[in-house]
Image (cartoon, rainbow, N blue to C red):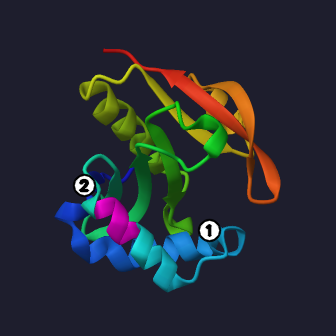
Amino acid sequence: MTAFTIHPLSQVPQARPACIAWSAREWGDDAQFQPSDWEAEIARIVTHPVDEIFVAYDRDVPVGMVWMLEQEGIDSHTHLTPWLSSLVVDPDHRNKGIAQALISHVETYVSYGGDTQLYLLTETPAVYFTGGWEVLDTAALSDRNVFVMQKPLMH
């Protein structure tokens, strides 16, 4: 297994182009965002007092990211916070444990902040069951229904 590290995007701003490219490739069609829209969203997150983007690095190369958001933007679930969002690992670096490390990093980060639950949206809930996640609800996202998942956090 390759050793990798995880950093807030604010500490590794050189990873911003990779984060924009991943976002555009993974969710551009669904979100109807252009790269400039992703740039604006990432800039909003970086300056937000709570939201954070974490970037995984393999040596000096960004290989994945995950967002931690105070709110996910689903009107029916604004009472839930915080959210794990926008998890992506570069295709050339998948199956190395990077996604799980990014998820664990966010879990630890929000737990240290005093949160006892973490939430996410997904179309594929089975991917998260082995990590202790459970389906809480469903929600409308764009033109489809997604699963709202939750995970209790240890302190």
- Residue 86 visible in the current orientation: yes
Residue range in magenta is: 42-46
Residue 69 locus on image (x, y percent): 42, 47
Identify the residue shown where x is 57% and y is 76%.
24
User: Does 51 lie within the magenta span?
Assistant: no
Choose between 7 and 78: the one closer to the eye. 78
- Residue 86's tag is none
Which quadrant, please, contains the C terminus?
top left
34 in relation to 105, above or below: below
Label 2 crowd bin: few (<14), some (14–19), many (20+), radius 10 Å: some
C-alpha distance separating marks 2 and 1:
21 Å
Residue 43 on the magenta segment: yes
Foreground: 24 or 91?
Answer: 24
Q: Amino acid at mark 1?
A: Glu
Query: Upstream in the sequence, badge 2 or badge 1?
Result: 2
Residue 35 vertical placement versus 27 (above, below): below
Q: Position of 34 compared to 51: left or right?
A: right
CB-based contact (under 8 Å), mark 2 and mark 1: no
Residue 26: numbered disc: 1
Q: Is residue 97 above or below residue 9?
A: above
Residue 50 in the image: state x and y as whole percent.
29, 46
Which residue, given by chain and number where applicable, does mark 2 sit on?
7
